[in-house]
């Protein structure tokens, strides 16, 4: 995305208001209820309201802000399509796809605000992270498979070779999708759609960082340290996500909740004890 002068940022906070409205809309519609008449009426009204916000923000956007104006046009078009789909009682699956597409546009607007707003004017909006059981299962499954392979089959050298080979492929795709919008769309919204997050359309995929960390730890730390780290993240992070979304009313920092934090530590500690008991009984829990 091309950098644009900060002084071009709309002065009336209309973009911040639009982003806030979009986040609220996505939060209230990520579980569609197309058979519920009250829900349909509520959603159609929200679509109209937020389209109005998008239109006002576009009027205030400078002519030079081509990227922003395109995103605002997307908001208007996608909300119109969403309202039409709701009016026609489209299936939940179709509405979820429409919501995912809109969440990608939201992340683009959020990125624009964070990059271009003057200091002190950045909206305190979070990334949109809907509950994703497929992603949670993927995290836990990768951690379990990696630990079992490393403990039962692979030497450090073999593990490093495999990880570097995978990283070469994943890293190549990361670079390629920055030069091809079509490839980026296919990878994020189709191939890895069940486990990707909307913000990863614009940023390095979290799995790439995860893989890089695995390589560094495999090369520099003892086997139990790597495996405990993988299991703590693989089980603690999904547990924190689920607990935080279910019971996370009390916040500690930003969107991180007390319930999610306690869930992370409980899951990480439990799975760590099981791992030590199975593979390294010579190491005490302490």
Image: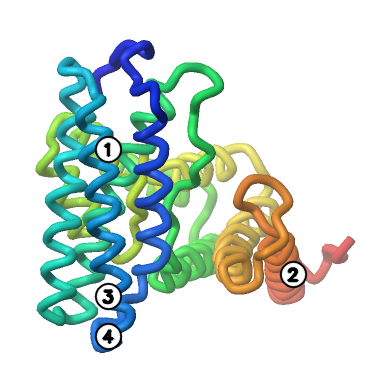
- Sequence-wise, the earlier of marks 4 and 2 is 4
Q: Earlier in the sequence, mark 1 or mark 4?
A: 4
- The mark closer to the camera, 4 or 2, is 4
Q: Secondary structure at mark 3?
A: helix
Residue at image position (42%, 47%) is 20
Residue at x 56% of width, y 68% of height: 245
Q: Position of residue 248 (x, y in %)?
A: 65, 65
Circle 2 packing at 10 Å, graded few (<14), some (14-19), many (20+), is: some
In the image, what residue occupies the spot 24% across and 82% down? 34
Numbered label attached to residue 266: 2
Label 2 secondary element: helix
Q: Are marks 3 and 4 in contact (CB under 8 Å)?
A: yes
Q: Which residue is mark 3?
A: 41
Query: Is the Cβ of the residue at disc 2 closer than 8 Å to that at disc 1?
Result: no
Quadrant holding the C terminus:
bottom right
Give the distance between the C-alpha atoms of the residues marked 1 and 4, in whole angstroms. 43 Å
* Of callouts 3 and 2, the N-terminal one: 3
Assign a secondary structure to mark 1: helix
Question: Where is residue 69, by image quadrant?
Answer: top left
| Label 2 vs 1, first from the N-terminus | 1
Task: Estimate the x, y position of residue 30 in percent, counting from the top left.
Answer: 35, 69
Q: Which residue is mark 4?
A: 37
Report the Cα–Cα distance between label 3 and label 4: 6 Å
Q: In the image, is residue 251 above or below residue 38?
A: above
Task: Please name the residue shown 14% across and 58% down the image.
Answer: 80
Q: Is residue 111 left or right of residue 249?
A: left
Residue corresponding to mark 1: 174
């Amino acid at each position: 995305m091309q950098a644009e002068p900060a002084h071009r940022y709309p002065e009336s906070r209309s973009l911040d208001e639009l982003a806030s409205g979009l986040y609220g809309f996505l939060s209230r519609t990520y579980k569609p209820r197309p058979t519920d008449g009250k829900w349909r009426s509520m959603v159609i009204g929200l679509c109209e309201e937020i389209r109005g916000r998008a239109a006002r923000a576009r009027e205030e956007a400078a002519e030079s802000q081509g990227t922003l104006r395109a995103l605002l046009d997307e908001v208007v078009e996608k909300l119109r399509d969403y309202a039409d789909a709701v009016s026609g009682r489209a299936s939940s699956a179709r509405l979820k796809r429409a919501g995912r597409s809109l969440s990608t546009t939201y992340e683009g607007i959020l990125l624009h605000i964070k990059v271009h707003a003057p200091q002190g004017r950045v909206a305190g909006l979070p990334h949109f992270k809907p509950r994703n059981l497929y992603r949670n299962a993927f995290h836990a499954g990768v951690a379990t498979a990696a630990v079992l392979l490393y403990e039962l089959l692979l030497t450090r050298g073999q593990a490093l070779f495999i990880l570097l080979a995978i990283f070469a492929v994943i890293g190549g795709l990361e670079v390629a999708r920055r030069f091809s919008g079509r490839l980026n769309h296919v990878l994020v919204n189709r191939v890895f759609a069940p486990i990707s997050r909307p913000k990863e359309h614009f940023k390095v995929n979290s799995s790439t960082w995860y893989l890089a960390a695995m390589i560094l730890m495999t090369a520099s730390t003892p086997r139990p340290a790597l495996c405990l780290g993988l299991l703590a993240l693989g089980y603690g992070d999904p547990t924190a996500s689920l607990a935080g979304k279910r019971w996370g009313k009390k916040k500690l920092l930003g969107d991180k909740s007390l319930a999610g934090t306690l869930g992370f530590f409980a899951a990480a500690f439990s799975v760590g004890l099981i791992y030590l008991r199975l593979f390294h009984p010579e190491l005490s829990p302490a």
